[in-house]
Image: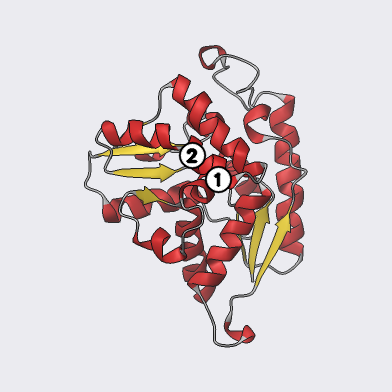
Amino acid sequence: MIGILGGMGTQAGLDFCNKLAMLNRGKIDQEYPLFMLYNKSNIPGRPESIGVHTKRFSDLPRNFKNNTKYNQVLKSLLEGCRSLEKSGCKFIVIPCNTAHYWYEDLKKKIKIPIINMPKEVFLNTKKVSKINSKIGLLATEGTLKTKIYEKLFQNKYRLITPLQDLQIKSVNKTIKHVKMGNIKLAAKSIKPAVNYLIKNNCKKIILGCTELPIAIFAFKSLKNVKMSKLYLDPNLILANSAMVKYRK
């Protein structure tokens, strides 16, 4: 059984579950994969817990892990993972990019495997993009500043991110709109950031916050998501990776 630690946010967790089911349609109920979603929506805000929204980027400490809020998030994530572990799940997926800043600490304390979503995105990128090409990254400020993706991509690709003004007015607003359920407005507000990356010759764009695929592919079918030549959807990639492990 696949353990899904969701709630970060709720819409993103449900998007992952929907893609997991749609990718693996069965003719009858019993042919669908077994999974358990723990929608742990009471986990403290990940970007806020590393000080992103309380200080300027340039003023952020080098080591975010030396603060109480970091440990509060870690404690809550551990509670969720242990609950899934005790429920008989064979492995865990976490459909939240920023939460993977806590990945190494979680892995040390959880006995069952946790699939690393950013790593799976990197492995997928290697299959579809030439080395040293420009890859756009749309993500939360927390993901950007803790360099979750940069650490994986830095020796192989040139990661391009929006300017800070676009980050605030386009990306951050889009994430907020999705969390509030305003998908039409989210689809509109993300366009300036996407256009910026396209103008900078990005061959692929990573939707590095799990709210963003909901905005980008609003009201479109799964076929549109799978056939996209521009976007890399971490939720879709993670769903595929989860099924590979599930079938072993």
Cβ–Cβ below 8 Å for labels 2 and 1?
yes
How many residues crowd mark 1 within 10 Å: few (<14), some (14–19), many (20+)? some
Q: Quadrant of residue 44?
A: top right
- Give left or right: position of 63 versus 150: right
Q: Residue at x 34, y 56 (%)?
A: 228
Colour scheme employed for the rendering of this structure: secondary structure
The correct choice, above or below, for 220 with respect to 151 in the image is: below
Q: Amino acid at mark 2?
A: Lys
Q: Residue at x 63, y 54 (%)?
A: 13
Image mark for residue 72: none
Question: Do we see residue 159 in this rendering?
Answer: no
Q: Residue at x 42, y 37 (%)?
A: 191
- Give left or right: position of 190 versus 66: left
- Give left or right: position of 137 versus 82: left
Image mark for residue 184: 1
Q: Quadrant of residue 150?
A: top left
Residue in front for this viewpoint, 205 or 115: 205
How many residues crowd mark 2 within 10 Å: few (<14), some (14–19), many (20+)? few
Question: Do we see residue 118 in this rendering?
Answer: yes
Quadrant placement of the N terminus: bottom right
Q: Amino acid at mark 1?
A: Lys
Which structural element holds mark 2? helix
Residue 159 x/y as whole percent: 34, 34
Residue in front for this viewpoint, 99 or 200: 200
Which structural element holds mark 1? helix
How many marks overall?
2
Image mark for residue 188: 2
Residue 195 x/y as whole percent: 35, 35
